[in-house]
Image (cartoon, coloured by chain):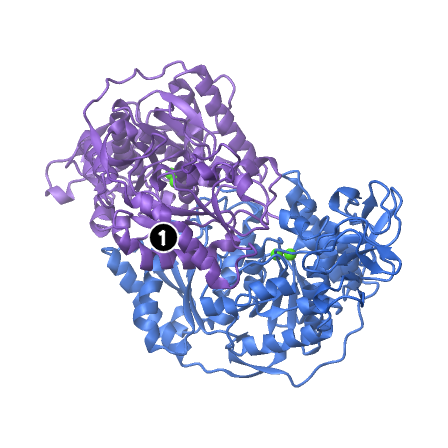
Chain colours: A purple, B blue
Amino acid sequence: MIFKTTEHVTPHEIPRYVKMHDLDNVAIVVNDKGLAAGTVLDTELVLKDRVPQGHKVSLVDIEQGEVIRRYNVVIGRALKPIPKGSWVHERLIEMPPALGFEGLPIATSPAQVLPALDGYTFEGYRNKDGSVGTRNILAITTTVQCVSGVVAYAVDRIKNELLPRYPNVDDVVGIEHTYGCGVAIEAKDAIIPIRTLRNISLNPNFGGELLVVSLGCEKLQPERMFPPGSFPVRVESLEATGPETVCLQADHHVGFMSMIDDIVQTAKPHLERLNARRRETCPASDLVVGVQCGGSDAFSGVTANPAVGFATDLLVRAGATVMFSENTEVRDGVDQLTMRAATEDVARDIIQELSWYDNYLGRSKVDRSANTTPGNKAGGLSNIVEKAMGSIVKSGSSPINSVLAPGEKLKPDQKGLVFAATPASDFICGTLQLAAGMNVHIFTTGRGTPYGLAQCPVIKVATRNDLARRWHDLMDVNAGRIASGEASIADVGQELFEMILAVASGKKTWAEHWKIHNSLVLFNPAPVT
Amino acid sequence: MIFKTTEHVTPHEIPRYVKMHDLDNVAIVVNDKGLAAGTVLDTELVLKDRVPQGHKVSLVDIEQGEVIRRYNVVIGRALKPIPKGSWVHERLIEMPPALGFEGLPIATSPAQVLPALDGYTFEGYRNKDGSVGTRNILAITTTVQCVSGVVAYAVDRIKNELLPRYPNVDDVVGIEHTYGCGVAIEAKDAIIPIRTLRNISLNPNFGGELLVVSLGCEKLQPERMFPPGSFPVRVESLEATGPETVCLQADHHVGFMSMIDDIVQTAKPHLERLNARRRETCPASDLVVGVQCGGSDAFSGVTANPAVGFATDLLVRAGATVMFSENTEVRDGVDQLTMRAATEDVARDIIQELSWYDNYLGRSKVDRSANTTPGNKAGGLSNIVEKAMGSIVKSGSSPINSVLAPGEKLKPDQKGLVFAATPASDFICGTLQLAAGMNVHIFTTGRGTPYGLAQCPVIKVATRNDLARRWHDLMDVNAGRIASGEASIADVGQELFEMILAVASGKKTWAEHWKIHNSLVLFNPAPVT
Ligand SMILES: [Ca+2]
Ligand SMILES: [Ca+2]
Ligand SMILES: [Ca+2]
Ligand SMILES: [Ca+2]
Ligand SMILES: [Ca+2]
């Protein structure tokens, strides 16, 4: 990556641009306010147009039909001649067709396994199944949206009346969702939302304490959500009866308060057990980090995502698990992924997941290009190919060791870099990564989003100084310093790695500070009824 | 309908059964605990099996292959011989195939228009567009899930700090949803969630006060949600700029609290205008009632739904608008609906909506039979045909005057009985009826559900005495008295009609008393990305 600045102006006015690869014929403008036509970027490069921040400038004359190359990847072809120094906006670029799934390189060049990184630890809550929580939360699982008003009432009461007595418990969270009834539960794809809900309940941050509130007549019965053997049994006596369940329609519930009291009383022993836990020193290999981007701009792929990629490599070297996701944002780099797969099996799993998703979109006659947003385009990302290249860099350079289908849970031996196939929707991706067993979430953003989850800490990384400045109490890390030359990718990557260890040990993120979070959103490819 | 009781036992033990139509060959058992084998129901009818409450008993010997008839409708055929007095459970019944859409009776027998019912009024909030609110709520509309954590924080602050100063304002509600980004917004069916959100914001209970919180980079931009002319403009100066919008990514927001302050300050004039309003006497014709059932049992179609049908007829006679919905629950009675259509156009619109829905389900290889739940079956409903017949009776006996597609808003001239096509999912149906302009919601339940909405009062009607007794502070009306012979359908229907007027005038429902409500759930037939 090449950063260029001229020397003859005051630092904050220096025209800056960034080229990702030697062979690229476009670069992007770094300066907060963009650069005016006539700006001299280089002895040989003078801007012909005003170019907004994050948008592309042509470094050479590009003929009509010639390829436009960024990240050393063809992001499209010129729809008309583009003289050197021009603003290369989306209307000048024809998007290339999606790569087919035939003839892809299969595990041809998995990266070398990087040298192990020893000695990094964090303070976490060790669970009986070997997983480690970074938070100590009582989750109240629900089988169906019907019960969520009652659960919210009970959660409020538990927080107000009980939680002060259990100071080691961080929070009480109702796992509210829109699934459970009024859905085609026998449809083939219904397995996705069902296993997602089951696996979320088993997230390491909930300490293996399973408390389920059911209505009684819903399609998603507790036995269906938790078939025998699907959950770790804490108390011998529960083994025969399934997870501990409060059923609102049970005959013994007379009056609303009997339901509330039942939930509150049932919560008590769980709170007591959670409260008795203490953080202990755990190796970094117990981290399960989910990385994601949202509200992306052209800097996502230049600053924040490469810094995340650097941290991903450090985590993998330390033995941790790192999941990257967002199907529509890796689709255009499928060849890079299959090439990096550790084994042929992994490569085929990647193809399987991405072709399944192509079909899912195709049923409604859309494709991966439905991903990009007005904000992406305003931020300089011309199309999904360009966006994808900037998104994939979050995965760093390790071999891809395994693949998860949506809603699946990581097995204990699935370490290192994992492709967890999910939609790119921030909330759906986060929900599915939670189900996979994530205990720290990394989220990069260029345009800015106040994203947070109640179930897991979210470290937000800003791509630009201006966003980091304005959203100083929402962004946890500023990767914008990479573009302004104040820090290297390695600097910010290392800082993020250390921030992950600190947050895993209990340091609060800004979203936790303000107690703001988003809803869980299930991926349900099957119809409602 | 025929209720039968024998005379020789104490009242609460009297064996009771109910037959819906003279030509039916099955009836259902009324008694709370069901009836034992050997019970003498009649001089000529002795139970051969134990029959649970709400389940069917054969009134005659039924041959293998012979039809089983309830509501004078064929609900299936006997899979083996069923002797008189047997428990006719679902495993004995073969479900009939769905009716085709060809050759249906088209507006052949719309019911006679019932005599007008004058003089009924309620106390409501008259809006500038002529609609009437039954509640006086400040709604904060959101364009995307990203902003919901921030909006929830701002809503809390408005409730705690401002609302005490505006005693005539009932509530402040954030319109949170999972749409707005990460969705295929150019897909054909995306029109449904988009217009739903737009039309919810215009619900009469929000007084025409439009306050939108947007992120900035989302796919569903405020201009797309509210294209010019789509919203009633209150302040001249807003006309050119669209609805009042707080955009979190706006440059002037520096720090989280600047976003919160901006939302709170923007809310103030809206609260002041809402607070200045007073209830005034309005004719019952200003009511827009949405009827729905959920957690149904065999009594839904015997007690609560017929009582709702009676109230529906009263409302229609009083000039009000009543919407019935739930596509998969009317699908098997499509011939009844097309027959009752006021015009051929209406009949064709019904067919259009139901065939669109068949196709929607068919894309995932399911059909309307995906509707029924374990609770339905445990409650005695053998299949979707039987459930449908019990669901349709909520619509009473008026001609069907018009049809709404999902998410559409009623036009001022769409009065009387309306088929608002929606999925049967309780939350999706309620959300779409809100978008249509509902100001009172009626919800019947047999198994029991604590359903509520923050945007509109929900009157819950229990189908059985036992549910009404146990859930005495969640159920607003007890239609179970119809089965036990304590009240007629007309008695309960009249009581419900009067309850609707009282609730529309400000009387709190139980869900409002406890402040419990469910999430809005959008119907998005298009994919996520
Ligand atoms: Ca992304
Ligand atoms: Ca995302
Ligand atoms: Ca229903
Ligand atoms: Ca028409
Ligand atoms: Ca329903």
State the residue lying farthest toward the top: A108
Residue A322 placement (x, y as % from top left): 33, 29
Residue B188 placement (x, y as % from top left): 57, 47
Label 1 environment density (alpha carbons within 10 Å; few <14, some 14–19, many ≥20): many
Specify whether A73 is left or right of A14.
Answer: right
Determine the residue positioned at 79% across, 59% down: B336
Mark 1 is on which residue type? Gly
Residue A310 visible from this viewpoint: no
Looking at the rendering, the quadrant in which ligand 3 lies is: bottom right
Q: Image quadrant of residue B479?
A: bottom right
In which quadrant will I find the N terminus of chain B? bottom right
Q: Image quadrant of residue B366?
A: top right
Determine the residue positioned at 71% across, 82% down: B117
Specify whether B464 is left or right of A308.
Answer: right
Q: Is residue B93 above or below residue B474?
A: above
Q: Is residue B506 above or below residue A463?
A: below
Residue A351 placement (x, y as % from top left): 49, 24
Residue under mark 1: which chain is it in?
A: B
Determine the residue positioned at 38% across, 21% down: A401
Q: Which residue is mark 1?
A: B216
Specify whether A500 is left or right of B18.
Answer: left
Residue A237 placement (x, y as % from top left): 46, 39
